[in-house]
Amino acid sequence: MRTLNHFTTRILPNILMALILVPACQAVASEPIQAITLTLGDYRFTPETIEVTAGRPVRLTLTNVDTITPHNFILKEEAAGLNIDSSVSAGKTTTVEFTPTIPGSYTFYCSKKLPFMKSHQEKGMEGTLTVK
């Protein structure tokens, strides 16, 4: 009788919990990644507007097509959990992954600047991330 009691009080609840959690974890893991390519060059982002879905992971590929000028991708919205600062050297590509959680529109920009010159953002290098 002790063995049956141990099974029903200790083992059976763990089995039931696993049966509940495994499908839930698989659903989260199977969310398709939102793959977006953003081109950086000539003091602009192309496209200037990106639209994503809240709660789904985003893989953002940043490609700098300029041959000399370095750029970066800055998206700082602490309240929305977005804190991205990624540099991209001239002629290089880098990838950033994040999962937006709060719907809204958020500005991203390039903060690079030469001394005594306007910043890339001041020259128009900014865009909008819209989270739906």
Image (cartoon, helix red, strand yellow):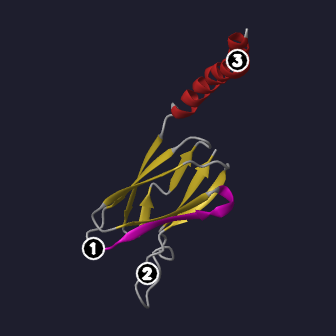
Measured Cα–Cα span from mark 2 to mark 1:
14 Å
The residue identified by callout 3 is 6
- Horizontally, residue 8 falls left or right of residue 98, namely right
Residue 94 magenta-highlighted: no
Point out the residue furthest to the front here.
2
76 w.r.t. 23: above or below:
below
Q: Quadrant of residue 78?
A: bottom right
Q: How many marks?
A: 3
Q: Relative to 24, say whether 89 is above or below.
A: below
Locate residue 2, reporting x and y percent.
72, 13
The three-letter amino acid code for the residue at tag 1 is Ile
Q: Secondary structure at mark 2?
A: loop
Determine the residue positioned at 58% across, 25% down: 22
Residue 21, position in %: x, y? Answer: 63, 27
SS at mark 3?
A: helix
Residue designated by label 1: 68
Q: Amino acid at mark 3?
A: His
Q: Earlier in the sequence, mark 1 or mark 3?
A: 3
Rendered location of residue 28, percent (x, y)? 57, 33
The residue positioned farthest toward the bottom in the image shown? 116
- For disc 2, the marked residue is 113
Q: Give, as a single range, the part of the protein colored magenta.
A: 68-80
Q: Position of residue 131 (x, y in %)?
A: 62, 48
Q: Residue at x 44, y 61 (%)?
A: 45
- Residue at the location (27% across, 64% down)? 91
Mark 1 vs mark 3, foreground winner is 3
Residue drawn 49% across the image and 71% down it:
124
Q: Nearer the viewer, residue 98 or 21?
A: 21
Sequence-earlier tag: 3 or 2: 3
